[in-house]
Image (cartoon, rainbow, N blue to C red):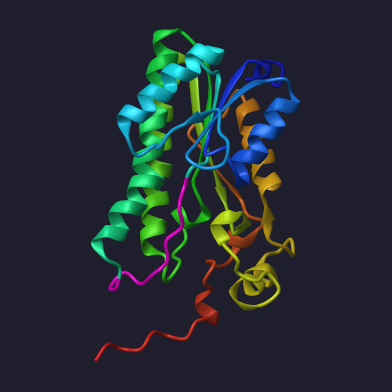
Amino acid sequence: MSQSDQAGAALVVGGGSGIGSSVAERLRGQGARVVVWDIAGAPDVRCDVRDPAAVDAALEETVELVGVPESVTVTVGVGQGGMLVDEPVEAWDRTMEINARGPWLVLRALARAMIDSHTQGSMVATSSVSAHLVDRGMGLYCASKSALSMIVQVAAFEWAPYGIRVNAVGPGVTQTPMLGRAPVDSGWLAGVRDRTPLGRLGQSGDIAQTILSLHEMEWVTGQIIDCDGGLSLYSPIDAFSDSVPPKKRD
């Protein structure tokens, strides 16, 4: 889908803040008719992606507003930190529900609408470098993003005959509301910055730029493109060489 094609209808899920907000702003700047789904802020359509009925209702409302979108961006997600041996089952369910099940429900609903209406286009989801890096203390998050990356690749294979491309972007550590109030000049964020070859943390605009580029790449599908300033070239976010081995449990 070329940039001129992007001036049609576009959906940004999780576009109320962070990366999604940057994507929506850039698409509007290109003249696209953008619809934002979110549960926070002031979205065009309120939608909790964990609920299949809510996704279907949001899609119906979106089609009434702008028609079937040719561009679909899914940036919804939640962070989760903790050692695997200590994490409660509820944390697994919540993380997988928001980071993997929710995006799948959205992609599935939009794919059905696009196929039924003979609409060709592009979908981009937000995975993470943590989908393929071993981040000690982030096992549930890593698992959820790994699941999402595989969903994207299988979807790309299944929906290619209908002219639907499906890709993902894999951000590194990016300054979004997900980081909360963690200081960037000290502690672990400063360590991540210092280990990043390009010398800084990612910004929402960095990831948005990559997402829009993927929407434009007409011969690319089923790819997860890391956008991390080079962080994943040589070490995980929690570099093993900098880690103190965990103590044995009594």
Residue at left offset 61%, top offset 33%: 214
On screen, residue 60 above or below 85: above
* Residue 126 placement, left or right of 174: left
The N terminus sits in image quarter: top right
Q: In which quarter of the image is the C terminus?
A: bottom left
From the viewer's perspective, is residue 224 above or below residue 37?
below
Q: Is any part of residue 165 visible from this angle?
A: yes
x%, y% of residue 159? Answer: 41, 21
Name the foreground residue: 62 vs 83: 62
Is 83 within the magenta?
yes
> In the picture provided, is 32 more to the left or to the right than 86?
right
Magenta region, main secondary structure: loop
Residue 158 appears in view: no
In the rendered image, residue 87, in percent from the top left (x then y), is placed at 30, 68
State which region is magenta.
Answer: 77-86
Give how far across and how far down residue 184 sits, in percent: 67, 69
Task: Write the residue at 38% across / 28% down.
Answer: 55
Q: Does the magenta stretch include residue 9?
A: no
Task: Using the image as rendered, state which of residue 49 and residue 120 is in the foreground.
Answer: 49
